[in-house]
Amino acid sequence: MRAGRPPVSALALPTAALADGSVEVLHWWTSGGEARAVGELKAAFEAQGGTWIDSPIAGGGGDAAMTALRARVVAGNPPSAVQLKGPGIQEWAEQGALADVDDVAKAENWDAVLPPVLAAIMKYENKYVAAPVNIHRVDWIWANPAVLAKVGVTTMPTTWDEFNAIADKLKEAGITPLANGSDPWQDLTLWDVVALGVGGAEFYQKAIVQLDPAALTSDTMVKVFDQMRKMRGYVDEGFAGRSWDLATRMVMNGEAAFQIMGDWAKGEFAAAGKVPGTDYWCAPAPDQGGYILNSDSFVFFKVSGEDKVKGQKVLASLVMSPSFQETFNLAKGSIPARTDVALDKFDSCAVKSHEDLLASIGNNTLVPSLSQEMAIPRSYRGEFLDLVTQFYNTDMSSADAVKALAAGIERARAQ
Ligand code: GAL
């Protein structure tokens, strides 16, 4: 997919040089690595003569940003571009809230350079209403090798049994095995990864994407919660109020051995000048083949005023330009959404992400992320979110969790 190297000329900034236009961008990229990445976008937009109005809403995973967005739309004052993704794009489009940038997409032939799975998410009624900026993989384990060495561990776990054995050893040695924070979406991210790892891609598709009642109540689902219960035992007691990037910092500083998080965590390591393979390790979380897909995109809301409409088009073109996709993703920890950007400047984790992405597309084990809002509408995701967090923070049994989850999904379906 990414085999062809683009000629150097293709890496120049898009030609709409020195366009004015203004854009208000609502996003949730406020951690060290995230802010660095979005700063690249702001700088590039301003370098073309545009006016950037920054509307950051803190809160990893974007739940707070989505609440703010709804309030803005209800008030009749939407921002012109919003960091938003997955089925949420279709939901806003169905409400008539989005503007299309299809003229830009056609002129630049986006169809030819985007993986079809992403292009489909970006379109409504066959017109582009969004521009994807990256591909984030969710199912990663990050580790501090110096901490693992303290208990004689020299390689990353490749099965959950191995993971549990290492985590038990660390715990015995008085070391926190797993860094996690307290946001419900962080718990759901962990659960997402465990669900693919324990259940496999077919199970994930059936239970989480198709919401099939038999898969939702299967023994496999019980096993997913059993492993999740173990994970809860591996985190330290001080997790209340901890954001995901502080959890990454714990691994960086040797206060915990592992974090399970999407590769935006790599943006934090990169911002701190850490080098993969030396200062930290990355490995796909134990699975039976598979890849949990997350992709950030900018979605364009209907706004009036020539200046704003122009700003949207300039932003759309910029976001999709090969040079920008390279610069941005080097900072963000992800890989470009475009398939024609060479990965020469990217690290080994990014190369692995790309290889595994292709393999998962080839053998049909690519799954959209539940936790990162790529899989199902918010009303259904909300049921998973509430239940998984409740399970994580109480002593609910796996059997009870499975029953409550299935009931929650039925409730959402009935609404
Ligand atoms: C994800 C988003 C990533 C990263 C993360 C933590 O949903 O796709 O880009 O920012 O949240 O905030």
Image (cartoon, rainbow, N blue to C red):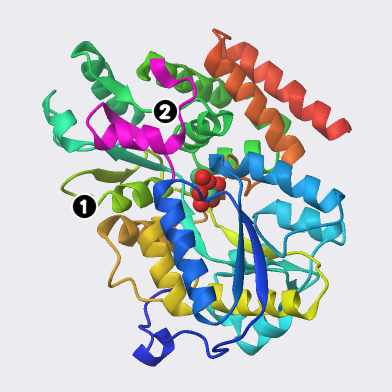
Q: Residue at x 44, y 66 (%)?
A: 40
Within 10 angstroms of label 2, few (less than 14), some, or many (20 or more) residues?
many
Horizontal arrangement in the rendering, residue 305 relative to residue 29 (left or right): right
- Residue drawn at x 64%, y 19% is 402
Disc sitting over residue 275 in the figure:
1
Rendering quarter of residue 83: bottom right
Which element is circle 1 on?
loop
Above or below residue 140? Residue 233 is above
Question: Where is residue 45 drawn, in percent x and y?
Answer: 54, 74
Q: SS for tag 2?
A: loop
Residue 376: mark in rendering: none
x 40%, y 84%: residue: 11
For this rendering, which residue is in front, 375 or 81?
81
Location of the C terminus (image quadrant): top right
Few, some or many residues within 10 Å of mark 1 (<14, 14–19, 20+) = few
Q: Which mark is residue 180?
A: 2
Residue 338 place in picture, x, y as percent: 49, 73
Q: Is residue 256 magenta?
A: yes
Q: Position of residue 241 (x, y in %)?
A: 49, 24
Q: Which contiguous range is marked in magenta?
A: 238-263
